[in-house]
Image: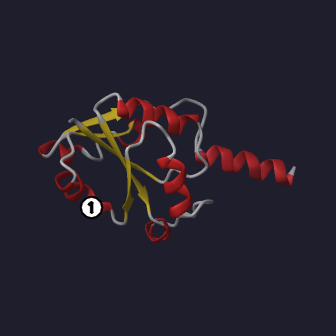
Amino acid sequence: MKKVITYGTFDLLHTGHINILRRAKEYGDYLIVAISSDEFNALKNKKAYYTFEQRKAILEAIRYVDEVIPEDTWEQKIQDVQKHNVDVFVMGDDWKGKFDFLQDHCEVVYLPRTVGISTTKIKTDLNQANNG
């Protein structure tokens, strides 16, 4: 079985998220999604609308996702790849080059992001709609 892993916050789920999950799953048989814990988001000065448990439940309901694990630190990626016997690490191309150090442990793939959508854009649009 070929295992794939990807990382993210996956807040305010949108078509860009679905696209990356679908395309990541195409690289293997089993997709693991590591989502930022609420504590890790706080360290990154990010605030998700949904809690970790809510985001986990949403992701577990998506047919491309086989397992959801927490991301608690930037440094845990090598450990996750080894612990879960991961063959392919997938991230959006906005991270291109940032995870090349994982090539010693698995294949690293950067996928193009979906044009025109992001959680940041959704939050900005909603904020403008509420203040306009």
Vertical comparison of 87 with 36: above or below: above
Vertical comparison of 105 with 28: above or below: below
Q: Residue at x 56, y 52 (%)?
A: 11
* Circle count: 1
Vertical comparison of 7 with 48: above or below: above
Q: Is residue 49 left or right of residue 84?
A: right
Where residue 112 sits, quadrant-wise, is: top left
Q: Residue at x 46, y 71 (%)?
A: 39
Q: Residue 69: x, y in percent? A: 37, 57
Quarter in which the N terminus is drawn: top left
Q: Is residue 16 left or right of residue 104?
A: right
The amino acid type, in three-letter code, at marker 1 is Gln
Viewer-side residue, 68 vs 24: 68
The residue at the far right in this view is 132
Q: Residue 45: x, y in percent? A: 51, 67
The residue at the far left in this view is 104
Q: Residue at x 20, y 39 (%)?
A: 87
Crowdedness near tag 1: few (<14), some (14–19) or many (≥20) residues, C-alpha within 10 Å: few
Badge 1 is on which residue? 76
Viewer-side residue, 104 vs 66: 66
Vertical comparison of 8 with 29: above or below: below
Q: Residue 50: x, y in percent? A: 60, 60
Where residue 115 sits, quadrant-wise, is: top right
Tell me how the rendering is colored. Answer: secondary structure
Q: Residue 27: x, y in percent? A: 30, 30
Q: Residue at x 67, y 45 (%)?
A: 122
Q: Is residue 73 left or right of residue 52?
A: left
**In the structure shown, which secondary structural element does the residue marked by tag 1 occupy?**
helix
